Amino acid sequence: MFRNDLSGQQIDNYELVSRISRGGMAIIYKAIQKPSGRVVALKLLDLNASGEQREEHVRRFRREAEIITRLEHMNILPIYGYGIHENEYAYIAMRLAGGGSLAEQLVRQPLSVDRAIEIFLQVASALGAAHAQGIIHRDIKPSNVLLDETANAYLTDFGLATFTDFATRLTASNALIGTPAYVSPEMILSQTATRRSDVYGLGVLLHHMIAGAPPFHYSGSNIAELLKQHINQPPPPLRTIAPNVPVELEAIVLRALAKDPDMRYADACEMARAVQALPIG
């Protein structure tokens, strides 16, 4: 998969300029759309996988494009086009956000409470728009939050998203959906993801931004231990790590991280309203 740098090559009417980032499935390039000259981010998926895996990847890619197309929100990057190039690459062209990812920022240092809340509210607003249309993201994490040059945040990567009335899984049978450090207990247990599953992801995200790390950790490759923590272990109160955090904000994060989905906020908008009502700022 992507053995060589594709910079300088042409994918349909997009000229690849330079590689921006690489994930588990896809790679993102800065590209120029011809003939307009518009600079875009081009997300590429190599289709040289085996038959069943290839079909799943293409399904997921198309689902992401279709979902983003129907979502119009200031904190969701719009797409300019998508397709399959010479049966070799699937691609999605979207607006280029030049500020890197939230994950890259968090590698350097935690965020202030004010900045974490600012980013949280933008991400929650985008997620709330998705929830209003019956869309569950299922993979909220820092690398799926992009920043522009003026530090606005954008929720990206709807490749694992699903609809509340569409229960078919987009991954192989018994495969874990989501990212281990951010996945909700019910998703680990192969139960249906709901808006409250995304709320759990928002809780992990907010904790990570302020504390500098997710609430649950594992050493080496012991992912099973991490998943058990999500299911059984209470999350550490945020103030034990960051004493300057308001008590009310700590309570919001702990509610979002409740093991029982019914104990969490109903959706991203309800959690955002609780944060907006905090006596800080």
Image (tube, rainbow, N blue to C red):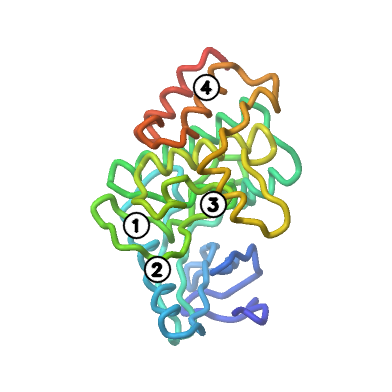
- Label 3: how many residues lie within 10 Å, few (<14), some (14-19) or many (20+)? some
Res 195 → quadrant: top left
Asked whether 125 or 33 is in front, the reply is 125
Crowd class of label 4 (few under 14; some 14 to 19; many from 20; radius 10 Å): some
Q: Earlier in the sequence, mark 3 or mark 4?
A: 3
Q: How far, Cα to Cα, is label 2 from label 3?
A: 24 Å
The alpha-carbon separation of the residues under discs 2 and 1 comes to 23 Å
Direction from residue 240 to residue 64 in the image, left or right: left
Rendered position, 129 above or below 90: above
Can residue 31 be spotted in the picture? no
Kind of residue indicated by mark 2: Ser
Q: CA distance from mark 3 to mark 4?
A: 25 Å
Q: Amino acid at mark 1?
A: Ile
Between the C-alphas of marks 2 and 4, the distance is 36 Å
Foreground disc of the pair 2, 4: 2
**Residue at x 56%, y 29% (from the top left corner):** 117
Front residue of this view, candidates 25 and 178: 178
Residue on which the image places disc 4: 251
Q: Which residue is mark 1?
A: 67
In front: label 3 or label 4:
4
Q: Residue furthest right?
A: 108
Q: Gap in Å between the C-alphas at discs 1 and 3?
A: 15 Å
**What residue is disc 3 on?**
144
The numbered disc on residue 30 is none
How many angstroms separate mark 4 from mark 1 (CA)?
Answer: 33 Å
Local SS, label 4: helix
Q: Residue at x 66, y 81 (%)?
A: 3
In this rendering, would 139 be left or right of 193? right
- Across and down, in percent, residue 99 comes to 64, 49
Residue 35: percent from the left, percent from the top? 48, 73
Give the numbered dot on residue 173: 2
